[in-house]
Each structure stands twice: as structure tokens, then as C-alpha cells.
Amino acid sequence: MQKLIVHGGTRLRGKVNISGSKNSSLPILAATLLTKDDCIIRRVPDLSDTNYMVQILRALGAEVERASGVVQVKAEKIKADAPYDLVRKMRASICVMGPLTGRLHKATVSMPGGCVIGDRPVDLHLKGLEYLGANVKMEGGNIDISASKGLKGTTMNLLGKFGSTVLGTGNVMMAAVLAKGTTIIEGAAAEPEVEDLAHFLIKMGAKIEGAGTTHMIIEGVKELHGVDHTVIPDRIEAGTFLVAGAICGDGVMLRRVIPAHLKNITDTLAASGYEISSTKDTVTIMPAGAPPKGFHLTTRTYPGFPTDMQAQFCALACTIPGLSSVKETIFPQRFMHVPELKRMGANIELDGDTARITGVDSLSGAPVMASDLRASAALVLAALNAKGTTEIHRLYHIDRGYEHLDEKLALLGAEMERAKE
């Protein structure tokens, strides 16, 4: 295993290219299982998660070639059993259930692994497939799905206790595109990544209306064909670099982004006093003209403030004057970064689903432990601000979701290096 050693106190400036979206790439790669034809996916980020998905596709029988951000898949002959040793490593592997059930009318998928950030049930995924006529059984750690008579369109609601389900919406959508009749999904996730998956499926010949809204209509078709598709930019990576620019930047420009996808992030930064400007595909953050002020945010499903940016904004709140509050409504237990930030001198009071944070004059370097993907990003951001050196252990969490994060930060002026544990 590796650790990241960050030498704090340097200022960041310059331009950085944002990678393709992890959370779009994974279900889109899974959706290639819906056709026998060649599919080409461009701007797939080089991450451990996307590497696992490529391995899963190969284990299912697909032919996969990958080079320079382009993945070509031909799933002419596939099987229905997703292997435990791969699925256990990544929660998003659950998204092969939909296309396997849609095309083969059966699937066996092990219960997935991934980040440990509280209860992340797959009940809404299974509920949606059952609505379509599938029979679901849980046995021996596996999810066994069968639909011997095929899938049939229906009306369903996928809204759960903590909002809509992104992967669940994708799974149902991928199954429904080959079902008989019309499927109506109420309470669908409206995230850009779901919309990107829908656009990919539409290019393949699917009939989908309402992508990007909570009300989707899917008319089943008999078969789909191959396509060439470019994944949207990763809005969470972009948001993370915006926070880096806020914490210790002297002008950081993000290139290859969709500013509309970042609105809640940039609005929060602007309200704190940072100068934000954008063009068609860039966003630039400049230091606040006056001392920045605290903020109060609540995570919501899209277009609300993204839960995947909560930890990074906790890190930011530690470094700016005054009181800030961060309320987590999607994954209420997603505060495992708080004890590690406290080790660095942060002043944080955790009350249930809300963190109240009072900014300190400076953080100090310390050995810290990454617990999940976004928590690890928050620790890197805090380390950039801290006096002295910070060692971030369990670096593999970062590599799950950020393409060459340390190299990109180094291009902006950060001082850091990887080392063996």
C-alpha cells in the first residue's frame, strides 16, 4: 500500500483539465452489455473503479480493449454470473444487474463492496426490477434475479428514505429499455450522470423521455446497437479542485467542465466571498477580495448540494473565519473524516447529521487515515493548508475516484509525493 505525503503551505495557481466522470463511466460501461455490437466509450478516467468494471465485463465474457481513456467493448456472448472476487471490491458493480436482466432475463451478482459510509442498501434497485416482473432471491451472499417470461413495463416510484437512487435509477433504466411495453419511473434520480447514461442508451436506439428529471418514460425496444460516446466531465473532481483553489489558490482555472453541473458548488463559494467566473467549458476561482465568511449548507439530491462534496466543504470550513454548518441528509453517517480533521487541529462539533465548524487560524500536519473516497479528498485539501507535513494513509481510496489527483495538484504548485507504507 501507499501513502501520500503532503507538504502544506504552498499556493496553487494555473490551469487543470478535469477528467471524465467516474459516476457516468461505470454504468455506461455496464450498459455495453445490452448489445452484441461494438461500443466505444471515450474519456473514461484511469481509476481503480473503472479498472474493476473492465475486469467484470471481461469476466462476463465481453471483449474489452482499453487505451488512453478509450474503452472499446464487444459483448457478443456473455454470461449472467458476476464474480464475487471482483464485485466485492466496488459498490457500483451492482449496476450490471440491470443490463444482464434486460438482455439475458437473469443475473447473479454478489452483494457489492466499496466505500463504508453507512447504510447504502440496494433494496430500491431490486424493488424496481421486481416491478418489471423479475423474481429476486437473496442466498449465500448473492442476489439471484430471474425473469423467465421476460420483463414488462410498468409504473413505479424509486424515491427512498433519503431521496432518489442514482445507481438504482440507472439499473432500472437499463433493464427497462429492452422490456415489453412502457415503463414510467417516478422519483427518478435527476443527476447529470443519470442523464448521461440515458443519452448513451438513446444513441443505442432506446426510447427514453424525461432524462434529467424525476419523471422518466421508457418505451421498450427489441434490440440495441453499438455507439460511440464521450463521457461528461466529472463534476465532483471539478468541485474538489474548486475547493483547493478556495483553500490555498491564487487563481485556479478548471478546463473541460460543464459549469451548469457545478452551480450549487460555485454558488456556495461565491456566497462565501470567492470570485467565480466561467465560460462555456471553464470555471475559474480567485481569492476572496475580503476575508471569506462561513457558510451553511445541506446536502440534497440533484440539483441540490451534492453529498459527494460534503467532506471537501468541511475541510474548507476549517480554514475560513467564523462559523459554518454542514448538514448531511443523504448519508447521515458520512462524517468519518471529522476525527481525522480534528487530528489536524480543526474545531468541529458533530451533532447527529450536522457538523458545526469554527474556522481556525491554521491547521497542522499530522498522520491521518482515509476512510472513504471523498473523506480522503478532504484530508488532501486540509493538508494543502496545514503547516508542516501531513501523511495520508490508505491512499487506495483516492485512486478509486480521482485520476492522478496528486499529479494534477503538483502541476498547480502543490508539494507532495507518494511513498510506501
Image: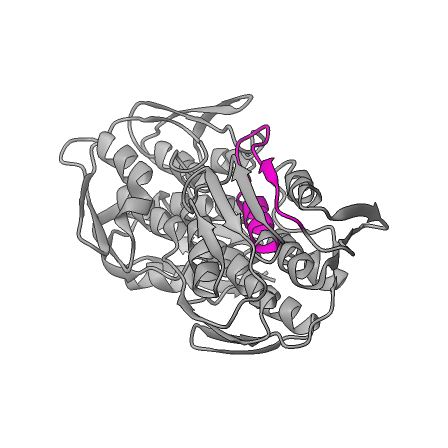
The image position of residue 200, as x and y in percent, is 45, 61
Observer-nearest of 386 and 303: 303
Observer-nearest of 263 and 404: 263
Q: On screen, 289 above or below 181?
A: above
Indicate how the structure is coloured in the image: one colour
Observer-nearest of 267 and 397: 267
Task: Locate the N terminus by quadrant.
Answer: bottom right
Q: On screen, 302 above or below 376?
A: above
Residue farthest to the front, as pictured: 181
Query: In the image, is residue 159 part of the stretch drawn in magenta?
Result: yes
Task: Locate the C terminus by quadrant.
Answer: bottom right
The image position of residue 414, as x and y in percent, is 32, 57
Residue farthest to the right, as pictured: 140
Q: Residue at x 35, y 46 (%)?
A: 239
Q: On screen, 195 above or below 406?
A: above
Q: Is residue 289 left or right of residue 233?
A: left
Residue farthest to the top, as pictured: 351
Q: Splitting the image into 4 quarters, where does residue 6 fall?
A: bottom left
Q: Splitting the image into 4 quarters, where does residue 306 fall?
A: top left
Q: Is residue 3 visible?
A: no
Q: Is residue 69 visible?
A: yes
The image position of residue 114, as x and y in percent, is 63, 51
Q: On screen, 297 above or below 109?
A: above
Q: Is residue 245 left or right of residue 116?
A: left
Q: Residue at x 56, y 36 (%)?
A: 336
Residues rendered magenta in the picture = 152-175
The image position of residue 218, as x and y in percent, is 51, 49
